Amino acid sequence: MPKHLGSSGPSHRPKGGREGPREGTVKFRTSFSNTIYDVLCAKGWEETDSEHDWDVHWAEREWVFEVFDQMHLEPHQRLNHFRNAKEICRKDLLIKNLKKRKRQLEKEGSYEEATQYDFFPVTFNLPREYALFVEEFKRQGGLWIMKPIGSAQGKGIFLFSKLSEISEWRTDYRYRPGNNKQEKEADAYVVQRYINNPYLVGGKKFDLRLYVVVTSFSPLNVWIYRTGFARFTNTRYNDDVSDITNSFMHLTNVAIQKTADDYDKRTGGKWDLRRLKLHMVSQFGTETTDAVFWEMQMIIIRSLLSVSSVMINDKHCFELYGYDIMIDDTLKPWLIEVNASPSLSASTQEDYVMKCEMLNDVLDIVDCEGKLKGDEEHVGGFDLVYENGFVDMDPKHRGWSSYLGSGIDRGPKKAGGKGRRQQQQQGQVPPEGGGGEMGEKPRLAALDTYSKFLQTAAKGLK
Amino acid sequence: MDQSAPHHPPHPSNPLNHHHTVTPSSALLSSLHLDPFLHLSLLHLKKNLIASSPTTPHTVESLKSAMLELGLTPKIRNLAYSLSCSERDRKSTPEILQVEQARDDWRQSIYDELLSVCSERGVSIVGPDTQQNKKIRYIFDSEDLFDAIKRIPCSSNLNASLCHNYGLIKLRLSTPDHSVLRTKFSELHPCNRHYGVDEIMTGSSKFIQHRQEVGVKVLQESYVPISRQYARYGIPASLRPEIYRVCLNLPRTFGAKEGEYYKSLREKARAIKYNVVDELFEMDSQTIISNSMSFFPFVENITNVVLAFSRDSWVAQNSTYAAHESIKYEMSDGTNVSIPSSGVQPFKGFVNYIAPLSLVYEDEERIYFTFRGMYSRLWCKLNVISSDSGALIHLCKTFEDLLLAWDPALFMHLLSVNVDPLSIAFSWIHLAFTNVLETEQLLLLWDRLVGYDDLLLLPVLSAAIFTFRSETLMCTSSAQEVKDILDNNSGRRIKVIPLLQAALFRECFK
């Protein structure tokens, strides 16, 4: 059983909700038109275009960069980004912060904890650390992945195993003079050792997307969503170096998978995290699986701890992060990257439902209406995992070290709101009734739900 | 086999002790003769004994210990058990004439369909496929089988009033009633702790730990009846791979010989293609598995398994029933082949029997042998037209009789809106609920099917689902409404074990 790092600290959340119950309808502002928009509407909240008169703004990051610094926010207003989330989302800054934390722990004498910060593959920022990279490359060789710092959806990423393969890139880079600071940053890359021994399911590689909400960085408050996705490639994995140009096999971003010839619209190549956990239990047993999921949770906490000191904390801000994690064939999880604007579009019906439920829970955590008491440890599918210290696990989940991958207990529920029909009309979501041949994700019933079920069963049998 | 073959004394709880009619020892010994594995093992044993002490005479004790060392004891024990079971289960009543006729017709119609698809394509069943036309269609599905069964008339020489008119199965088959079921499935009583119920209650960690410990001990025994008994209470996910194997009379751990055998089947599939047959299996796998939320990563594995299965003559020789007929074909070199060797023709939905195992086993080889075992013992009974107790028709009639007994008002109401309950439940039974339940629940159900080595829980569960939804169903006024309430998607929320318990032991819940 993995060790815990200490127990929960005193709660810093004000009792009785943030500011008490709201007067009137909550007003929201957003430029998104997909799941988050549907969820905000489904809550019965009012949309507004106003610059200042809103209660919650689900903004794009560009807005935060451009406008936030000039704005003054009222105490009750909530914004979905922290000012400098780039500290965790930009690949080069994340690495810098992780390395810094590791050094800090070593300086403090916490050697054991410092060694735990080995969950990111060897990475170098380019072009600054190019010489260091070459030294490592000459020593170890292997397969490396080049990622542009500002990229999303897999754009501009490529694999290489020979220095000659990147000499072209180097030349390109040199000839791109960047007087504009932003342009120069956009050309910067990280180069990372590629994980060439992924844990495969059905011979296929996958990576994991986990959802995390941070409501405060100091003190650090972290909510982790129980479920998430395992995103599969469609072709069987082959670690033959000659195959590295086959983007589809190696890169699992859904955007890239969608262009593969045999990409299947229906499934979207994703597994619910719970489905993966069950599969791993039958392959490796409960203890091993528990350890893997615990490790993933610790990656989330440790990465957030690494940036908590540099993040500009702001009581108005909260943020939803999409964590990308990969598991190798020794069942060690690796942190690939953190997204501050995880994709909110849905590729299938199930995806849509999952994202809506999750976003609804996020808004419940943010609690614009002051409905929360302030001592909750579970909101919807989110669990409060860290509140200035680790939060003790619910005794009901005895046997597991984390909630990740557990079932979410929601009562009978209708999915989506009027927005979903709009989506159907636009052809984005398949119409109802397209259920698969096999069942959907399972949900564990809590004790009271189970006995209610039994009572209904008995009643039905006269 | 010579006279020095060791006579293995019966295990104390061996069912052999309970049999009176069959004399096991003589029948067994002669069967043991024929088992090639056993013959080889005994030769090996003899060699070992002679090598270890060439001069001293061998006692029963030394033979027993030598057998234990070689790991023969569990294998012989299981072999003895399974032989005694097959003795006990051997059919004693002849087939009803109408059913026999229907079976022959059904097999013939499949045969004809297959050949007609071949000629539509312009190819022969084996041989080069040079045709551009890739048009292909399924040769049959659940509905067709259902139609074939519905058509079977009641025996004409019986008084018509004795055949109840309400169900679709007109045959007069005796089906188990409620009290018989309660006795047969007494382990399911709610006083017992079960996987599917107790592992999610508070205080479950002790139960889970206990089940795990018992399971490990059961596996050490590796004795078929004990493993089956264990399975009846549900199996923890980590033990399921091995427990299933033992219950199906396979060695507990996967062996090199099995790996080689599977490889040879894959080779056969690569070497000679069956036109149409292979394509139908592949199409089945592609459409169903690729579109499945749970199984899409395993589409290649499952396709390989089903193609290997079609090349395995073991299936034809060892299945309890021969569901379909193979096409006999003379190859260019004069050899005769059966297509497919397994004797199981492709139909829409066949891969459903394989898919759930992809979440139990890691590799396709391992999936293969468990699937093959399950097919030869269980699924073949769901695909044969026979009036035998435990086979498809009997299961369908059991469903109808149970529903009629449990909720006659509902049954009549459904008839009044032109819905025969069996028309909805048929595919549930035929495909062993693979198209209804979500996987975790499905495997909990299969644990019991494997544990009881019996399919009777399929009609019981079907009837239980109907009665569970009785209130809503009584309010329907059209066939479409009934179908909507009972459509396969609604099965996703079903918790199998509580439902079975409520159905069988309802007085506990009053």
Image (cartoon, coloured by chain):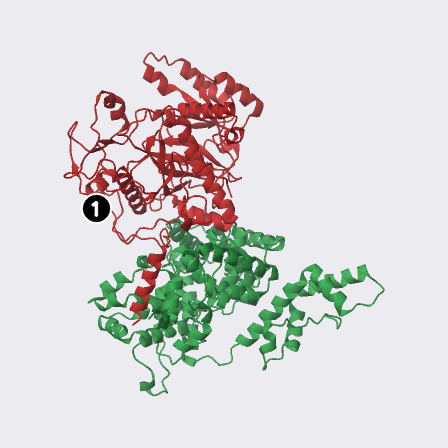
On screen, residue B371 above or below A289 = below
Say which quarter of the image contains residue A326: top left
Residue at horizontal 49%, vertical 45%? A289
Looking at the rendered structure, the kind of residue marked 1 is Gly
Front residue (pair B17, B146): B17
Identify the chain drawn in red. Answer: A
Q: Residue B69: percent from the left, percent from the top?
A: 71, 59
Q: On the rendered image, what quadrant is the C terminus of chain B found in?
A: bottom left
Q: Quadrant of residue A265?
A: top left
Going 37% across and 70% down the picture, which residue do you hit? Answer: B508
Q: Mark 1 lies on which chain?
A: A
Task: Please indicate whether residue B137 sits to the left or right of residue B368 in the image.
Answer: left
Residue A202 lies, with reference to residue B275, above or below; the image says: above
Residue drawn at point x = 49 percent, y = 81 percent: B93
- Residue B43 seen in render: no
In the rendered image, the residue lying farthest to the right is B55
Horizontal and vertical percent for residue A340?
33, 31
- Residue in front for this viewpoint, B289 or B449: B449
Instruction: Please state the horizontal and vertical placement of residue A314, each as a whole percent of the image.
Output: 29, 27
Q: In this view, does A375 lie above or below B455?
A: above
User: Of residues B195 and B444, which is closer to you in this image?
Assistant: B195
- Where on the picture, by quarter, is residue A227? top left
B445 up-or-down from A349: above or below: below
Q: Is residue B80 left or right of residue B234?
A: right
* Residue hosting label 1: A417
In the rendered structure, the colour chosen for chain B is green
Instruction: Pinpoint residue B395: horizontal percent, then vertical percent.
Output: 40, 72
Q: Mark 1 Cα within 10 Å, few/some/many (few <14, many 20+)?
A: some
